[in-house]
Image (cartoon, grey):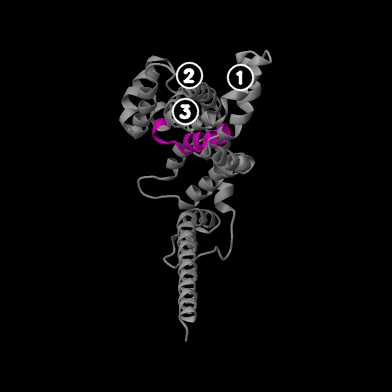
Amino acid sequence: MTTYDTRRRSASRTQGNLKRRRTLGKAGLNTTAVLVFLFAVFPVYWMVTTAFKSSEQIFTTDFIPFPTDPTLEHVKRVFTEGVAGHSIWRYLLNSSIVALGTVLIGAVFALLAATAVARFRFRGRTSFLILLLIVQMVPGEALLIPLFLMVRRAGLYDQLLGLVVVNVAMTLPFAIWMLRTFVAAVPKELEEAAWIDGASRFATFWRVLFPLVAPGLVATSIFSFITAWNEFVFALTLIGDQGSYTMPVALRYFVSQRSVDWGGIMAASTLMTIPVIVFFLLVQRRMVSGLVAGAVKG
């Protein structure tokens, strides 16, 4: 056997080993991804299936993956009896007002602040960016008492507007930091060309910068919407009227000192997730394009 044949066989074995390693690596990654997906989806699956199980199946010790005899008992009870003497639609409306208000107000301030940070050079700019990161590290519960005092002094206690303002304050640092990347990715030469053509700063911002940053704005709004929709601690503290509660706070009325209405909780929680899913499906394409655009500068 010649030296050439030996080297060729050795190279073939090496390539075969590399292919097997790559195949095993891909299989391991795919298996891990599937396991993570199942781990994340299982609570949602259990919530939905429990909402359609009878009370006997809910409290049984046997493992029942699917309801053998699906029932709308819990869903009908949530719609007819409501929660804490109020209709479930009222709580959904309150949550929608808070979440959409947070998204709209936060988007305006975040876009303006991100544009200022990305386009202008001013004293304290670096310190401002670092401060945004520091604010994200502070737990919201640590700011509960100061925010409560500020909201009460402003006359916004027990009002949805006060809860909107607090949610905007909590989501704004992340929104500014994220939008800054999208604004910086837009070439400044496009704005300069618009100025040369006689466009004002506002016209340049609205007709040139805003359409290019819109996907990033949508991606940021999704995070703000989900954060405001699921917020519990501030809604419980800043709202005293039961009729002004949001859905996360209303769910606690299914838990009493002696029993837990698991069917009602799961049915109301399933209804609570529907608006989030619908909102995500409407803007998912914009979100993906926005995240990809924000990952590449230029």
> What percent of the width, then of the height, locates residue 68?
56, 66
Label 1 sits on what residue type? Glu
Q: CA distance from mark 2 to mark 3?
A: 14 Å
- Residue receiving disc 2: 120
Q: Nearer the viewer, mark 2 or mark 3?
A: 2
The quarter of the displayed image where residue 157 is located: top left
Label 3 sits on what residue type? Ile
- Residue receiving disc 3: 176
Q: Is residue 185 above or below residue 33?
A: above
Query: The magenta stretch spans which residues?
Result: 217-234
Q: Is residue 45 magenta?
A: no
- Residue receiving disc 1: 192
Q: Does dot 1 land on a helix, a strand or a loop?
A: helix
User: In this rendering, does residue 93 appear at all?
Assistant: no
Label 2 sits on what residue type? Phe
Q: Does dot 3 land on a helix, a strand or a loop?
A: helix
> What percent of the width, then of the height, locates residue 33?
48, 59
**Of callouts 3 and 1, the N-terminal one:** 3
Q: CA distance from mark 1 to mark 2?
A: 14 Å
> In the image, what residue occupies the spot 42% across and 16% down?
122
Q: Nearer the viewer, mark 3 or mark 1?
A: 1
Q: Which mark is residue 142?
A: none
